[in-house]
Amino acid sequence: MKTNLNLGWEFFKDLAAAGEKVDLPHTWNGKDGQDGGNDYYRGTCYYKKTISKAECTGPVTYLEFEGANSSADVKINGKDVCHHDGGYSTFRVNITDYIEDENEICVAVDNAPNDRVYPQMADFTFYGGLYRDVNLYNVPETRFDLDYLGGPAVAVTPVKNGSDFDVTVDCYVTNPAGTMTIKIVDKGEVIAETTVDAEAKTTAQFTIKDAHLWHGRKDPYLYTVVAELASGDKREVRFGCRTYEIDPDKGFILNGESYPLRGVSRHQDRPEIGNALKPEHHKEDLDIIYELGATTIRLAHYQHNQVFYDLCDEMGFVLWAEIPYISQHMPNGRENTISQMKELIVQNYNHPSIVVWGLSNEITMKGADDPDLVENHKILNDLCHEMDKTRKTTMAIVSMCPPDAEYVKIPDCVSWNHYFGWYGGDTSMNGPWLDKFHAENPSIPVGMSEYGCEALNWHNSNPEQGDYSEEYQAYYHEELIKQLYTRDYIWATHVWNMFDFAADARAEGGEDGMNHKGLVTFDRKYKKDSFYAYKAWLSDDPFVHICGKRYVDRVEEVTKVTVYSNQPEVELFANGVSLGKQSSPEHFFYFEVPLNGEVKLEAKAGSCTDESRIVKVDKFNDAYRMVETGDVLNWFDIETPEGKLSIMDRLDVVMKHPEALAAFGAFIKQLAPEGKTDGGMMDMGAMMQNEGMMKMMGAFTVKRMTSMMGTAGLKNPTKEQMIELNKALNQIDK
C-alpha cells in the first residue's frame, strides 16, 4: 500500500533555529534562484516530519523520495538509514527496523558545490529541496523489489515478430514464495495471462497477435501489464509496441514510416516555485508543446518527473532522456554518472516514448581530448547497451568541439548545439555546417540538439543579432526552420528552449537570472511570435497569427507586418482595406503596411482570423528598448577613445592583441570562486585562444561576454572591475 506524505513538514536552514511549516513539493531556491546575482543559497537544509507506528502497518515499511536535489541523508529517530547522490531520480529506503511508537523523519538535503555529483556547472539553477513527492510503502515480506535503483520491479520488452509482438515481462521479487500471476490488459480486457512459481521463475513470455502499435502523436496506443503475487503485492505498468530506426540519410523512422522528430527541449521550473512542480504544471507544459505540433521533446538536462513521462506516453511524444553529465567533466564524478544512468534506465525502461539515452551535454567545454572523459563516455555507452538492448544512445555536443574528436564517434547517433546567428556567426551557417558533417561522416546520424536566441519584451523594426528583441528571435527561427526542416537526414531537432527558465548566474537581456530563449515566457502566459512560426510548420490545426502584438507604437511611415499560418493563403486588411493576398510554401507571409494614426489589422486564412493594432508615433517608444540593469551598465559611461580598444569592441578583435589577452586574463582571475585560481570552469585566456570558441563567441562584445560570466562558474563582475578592465583596454591601440 502506498501513502503520500507530502503534507505537514517542517523546513530548517539551521536545525538550531525555528523551522517553517511547508508542504511538498518544496525548494528553498524558488526566489533567490531566479532573481539574478549568481548568489542563490547552495548548502544543506533539513526537512522533518513525524509519523506514528499506526501509519507503518507493514510488515515491511519503506520511504520513497521521488526527487531530493542533489544529495540526501535520511535519518529515522536520529539514526542514519540512507544516503543518496543524484537530485533527479527516485530512491527508497527500508525503515522497518527503525520504527518506534513515534517516528521522526529527518532529511538533510544538500545542493552545495562539490566535485563528484552532477551537475556542478551549467546554465540553469540547481534548486535544492524535496521538490517531488515523498511516499510511504507498507508491503508484505514477499514483495516486488523496492530496493533496486528506484525502479518499478517490472520490466516489459516488446519485440516485433511479423505483425505480432513477442513480449517479455521480467519481474523482480524480494523473498520470493508462492505464485505470481501476470496479465496483459488491453483497454480493460485481459488478452494474455499466466501464473508462475515466483520462487522458480519471474519471467513470462507472451505474444500479442496483430499488435496495435504505439505510433507517436498519430496513435499513442498503450497496453498494461498487471503482475500480482500470492502475498497480495501488485504492480501495474504500461508499455507500447513499436519499432524505430535512426537512419543517417532518412532520419527517424517509426514503425517503418518516416516520422521526422521536430520539437523542443524543456526545463522543469516555474516562477517562485522553482522545480517544485505539481501534476497540473506538467500537463500544462505538455498541452502547450502539443499545440505547437512538436513530435519530440528533449528532457534537459536530467531525469524528469514520472508524471511527465507518463503523459508523454499517453500523448505520443518521442523523448530524449539524459543524465546531468554536463559542461565540466569531473574525474571524481565517474561513479555518479554511472549511478545516475542506471537509475534513469531502470526507472524509465517501460516508457515507449523514450527512444534514446543521452550520455552527456556540452561536456567538452574545456576540450575533447581528455582520456578520462573519453573513457567515461565509453563506459556509459556500453552500460546503456548492456542494460537496454532496445534503445540507442546519443549526446549533445558543444559547437566548438572538433567534429573528428574520438568522443564524437562513441554513441549511436549525435546531435550538436549550434547557435550561429546568436553566439557568433550568422543564421545561414547552420544548415551548411550540418551538410558538411553529414558528408564527412555518412554513417553517423546527426541532429541539432540545441539552437535558439533570446527574446524579451523588446522590439525593433530593424532587428539585429544580440538585441534580445522578439522580432530578431522570430527572424532567427524562420531562418533555422527553413534550413533544418528541409533536410531529411537530420534525425532530430530540438529548439532551445520551449520555455524561458531560471539561470541565476545570468545577467543579460535586461532581466537578470533568466535564460530567455524560450518560445514561451517563464510564466507560460505569453507565446512569443516564434512559437507560431513553429506551429505553422508543425501543427495541422488551422490557424493564422499576426506577429508584433506587443509592438504597437511605430515611427516608420510604412512598417513590415509578418503573419504566420499553416493555411495556403493569407489576406491582410488594414482598417478594413485589403493589402492583398499572399501564398507561401514556407508559411511566412510579409506585408508592407502604411501607417497613419491607428491601424487595425485583420488577417484571414481560410476560416481563420486574427486581429492586431499598430499606431504611428513621432518618437520611438523607449519602453521597447532593452534597458540593462545591474551594477555595471546603468552606473557609468564606458570610455571609448578613438583608435583604442574598449569593452564595446568584439572579442575576436580584442583578443588579437597580447596585451588585451593579458588584461582579460587578470580580469577573469578576479572572478574566480573562493579557493580557485584557475577561473572556475573555464580558463578564459585559453578559451579565447581556442579557434572553435572564437568562431562561436568572437562576435560578442567584451561587455556582452562579461554579462555571462556567471554561467561559466565565475562571479559576476562589479562596476569597479568593469571600469578597470575598460581602462586597461583603452591603453591599447586597435
Image: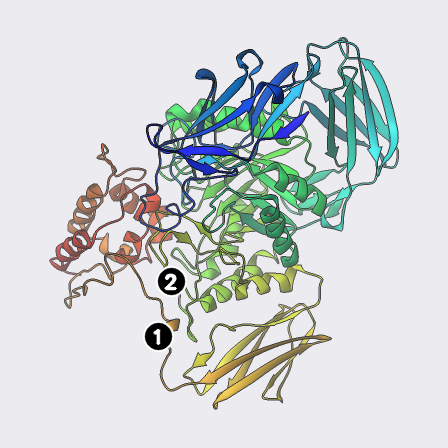
Tag 1: residue type? Asp
In the image, taking residue 516 as reference, residue 444 lies left or right, namely right
Q: In the picture, which quadrant includes the C terminus?
A: bottom left
Query: Label 1 belongs to which residue?
Result: 622
Asked if 243 appears above or below 709 in the picture, the reply is above
Sequence-wise, which precedes: disc 2 or disc 1? 2
| Residue sitting at x 76%, y 23% | 169
Task: Reply above or below: 551 against 651.
Answer: below
For the N terminus, the image quarter is top right
Specify how the rendered protein is coloured: rainbow
Q: Residue 193, position in %: x, y?
A: 86, 24
Residue of label 2: 466
Q: Secondary structure at mark 2?
A: loop
Label 1: which secondary element: helix
| Dot in front, 2 or 1 | 1
Q: Quadrant of residue 307?
A: top right
Instruction: Classify 205 as above or below 733.
Output: above
Label 2 Cα neighbours within 10 Å, binned few <14 / some 14-19 / many ≥20: many
The image quadrant of residue 459 is bottom left
Q: Which mark is residue 667?
A: none
Residue 82 point in image, percent of width and height: 48, 19
Task: Pick whichever, 76 or 648, lies toward us.
Answer: 76
Q: CA distance from mark 2 to mark 1?
A: 18 Å
| Residues tagged 2 and 1 counted as in contact (Cβ below 8 A) | no
Label 1: how many residues lie within 10 Å, few (<14), some (14-19) or many (20+)? few
Q: Is residue 381 visible?
A: no
